[in-house]
Image (cartoon, coloured by chain):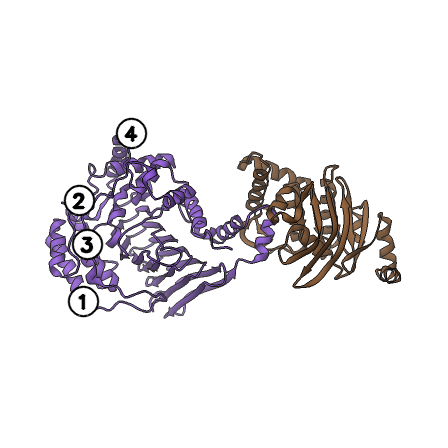
Amino acid sequence: MSTEVNQIEELANKEYKYGFVSNVEAETFPKGLNEDIIRRLSAIKEEPEFMLEWRLKAYRHWLTMKEPNWANIHYEPIDYQDISYYSAPKKKPKLNSLEEADPELIKTYQKLGISLEEQKIFAGVAVDAVFDSVSVATTFKEKLAELGIIFCSMSEAIKNHPTLVKQYLGSVVPSTDNFFAALNSAVFSDGSFAYIPKGVRCPMELSTYFRINAANTGQFERTLIVADEGAYVSYLEGCTAPMRDENQLHAAVVELVALDNATVKYSTVQNWYPGDKNGKGGIYNFVTKRGMCKGVNSKISWTQVETGSAITWKYPSCLLIGDNSIGEFYSVAVTNNYQQADTGTKMIHMGKNTRSTIVSKGISAGKSNNSYRGQVKIIKKADNARNFSQCDSLLIGDKCGAHTFPYLEINNPTAQMEHEATTSKIGEDQIFYLNQRGISREDAVNLIVNGYCKEVFKELPMEFAVEAQKLLSVSLEGSVG
Amino acid sequence: MLEIKNLHASIEGKEILKGINFKVNAGEVHAIMGPNGSGKSTLAQVLAGRKEYEVTKGEVVFEGKNLLELSPEDRAREGIFLAFQYPVEIPGVSNTNLLKTALNEIRRYRGLEQLDAMEFLTHLKKKTKLVEMDQALLSRAVNDGFSGGEKKRNEILQMAVLEPKLSILDETDSGLDIDALRIVANGVNKLKSHERATVVVTHYQRLLNYIVPDFVHVLYNGKIVKSGGKELAFELEEKGYDWLKEQKELV
């Protein structure tokens, strides 16, 4: 872990030098959204003409759309004219030491086992550039470049790799896909771009960790990952440290493309501010994530650990177009206090012999509501498609809710479907049993919850998995009386 | 080691234990026998600290400490182990993980160093061998999908690993065939030492052929109505509990 942490710190220090952030004037747009705003945004980002057209088209379509209301979530209407759609990556208020940071935040960092140096970055404390950062960062960049891998910010990609962007942006999630995706297409400020060329196996986990500044532009993030024929990439999004943000609305879009024999593995740990114990504040997280298994034998695997946000609306999906392609979705979604999550996946089987696996583990505590919503669709010509779905709900306490909304649409008689669903509660007898072995109540709950999530955690990269376990225990703190 | 004085306990307002007195010294094996509903399991649960039971009167002193003031986990950390009559299933949590967490919690409480993964595994293997248990039990989720016999054996394995001072076996013999019974009893006997004590709760004499008690107490209607040596168990087996009930009513 420590080498990685060092790299993170070093890269964080070097953000400008390595061009991770567009060098724009500090500026914040007035509130409100119209075509002028979009033109200004595109101009500031020095985008080519096609991008502006693309954004405007999305915006015009968005105007004709209605906010979806089918999800099992409740919130006050959002005033889209009361949001500022661009704010130059401004520096977080820099503190001189950790002592000046919010003590609650620091306590959480400590529980998560985040190193002191890393804590400083997250809390916005100026980090001393004491490491020999140039060499590590350069090695990292050089290694990727040697293999022809492109990994940069979306803004940079639009400027430096317009052909790739033009070819793939919106190819999986069209700008007209849904209300939040259209909004994102019109106004996205930045995000990540990765391209893995033919036959290349990306030798390291690509991570937004390496571009920590992206967290500050996270309101309308746009991510595009393309794995060319035979390529492999594993991408990590987010981190376990709680992320505070003054923007309440987040509407990100992530697109993954896997060509023939390519594999994309995308792991997320989402820990945006969930609001306080009484349900005040917190991020509204409306995310569209979709992967396209375009080529034969391609594979896309989503793994997510969702513990943050006041509202989560998110369905990482796979379009299984290529024959023999594979889609996977592994999810742990935790809600506590007044959090609401409506999350799941869509597996659309279009090619022959396509397979999909869905493992969803919902955990509800406090007064929260946790819904699994998943669709498995098998089109007429998708012979021999197979799906396995397992949706489990775990309840902690008796004031929370767990809901499951599975949708199956099967248009081919050769399909094989398996669906398992369970709902369980952490029993007092289980807790007493563990107490009797010397384990405290809180540790007992953690042990049970982690056991319950094991199938998903084992899909996460090792270090992420360890952090995810700690994160779960922090998220569920105080949920057992 | 353990001294129970005039212990009264009730559940949902109903008094189950009506003045229990007995004393267990290190190195001893006590058997508590009695007909169904006499309060045997209640006594075991009360000692372990199950909060559904309310102690209304009396005292329990364990190793000089007031046991009733301690939380269930602290009682366990002080060295009390209850082999459950109905071991609970915990899906997804492996036996090894449970035992490592438990042992390290107990060690922390006692101010001992934490065992790392290797040290723990060495300890675990040794104990598994000692009680002649199948290694395969270790990687399985706690009691999940175990047969009745496997669950009981698993309790004994946990006992071996956690090395309690006082083990309370609550009807560990129920539902066991003769082979499983022998394995369980064997495990208990191997763990016997002059520093440790065992309380066996049962209503058949059968188990006591394998685990030979130093003392036998007969519990009836929430009270110990007779205490004696191991021969008392044989007498009970022969005459049944009615004999004592009559005797008690005469008194």
Please, which chain is the residue tagged with disc 1 on?
A
Image position of A431 (left or right of A319): right
Q: Are marks 2 and 1 on the same chain?
A: yes
Which badge, 4 or 2, is on the more N-terminal residue? 2
How much space separates mark 1 and mark 3, taking CA atoms?
25 Å
How much space separates mark 4 and mark 1, taking CA atoms?
50 Å
User: Dot 1, crowdedness within 10 Å: few (<14), some or many (≥20)?
Assistant: few
Q: For mark 1, what is the residue? A: A63
Please, which chain is the residue tagged with disc 4 on?
A
What x and y, as percent, mark residue A182? Answer: 22, 62
Which badge, 2 or 3, is on the more N-terminal residue? 2
Which badge, 2 or 1, is on the more N-terminal residue? 2
Q: Is residue A288 above or below residue A197?
A: below
What x and y, as percent, mark residue A346? Answer: 35, 62
Q: Is residue A36 above or below residue A159?
A: below
Q: Is there a contact, CB below 8 Å, between mark 3 and mark 4?
A: no
Q: Quick check: can you spot residue A87?
A: yes
What x and y, as percent, mark residue A112? Answer: 41, 43
Chain ID, brown in image:
B
Q: For mark 2, what is the residue? A: A22
Q: For mark 4, what is the residue? A: A130
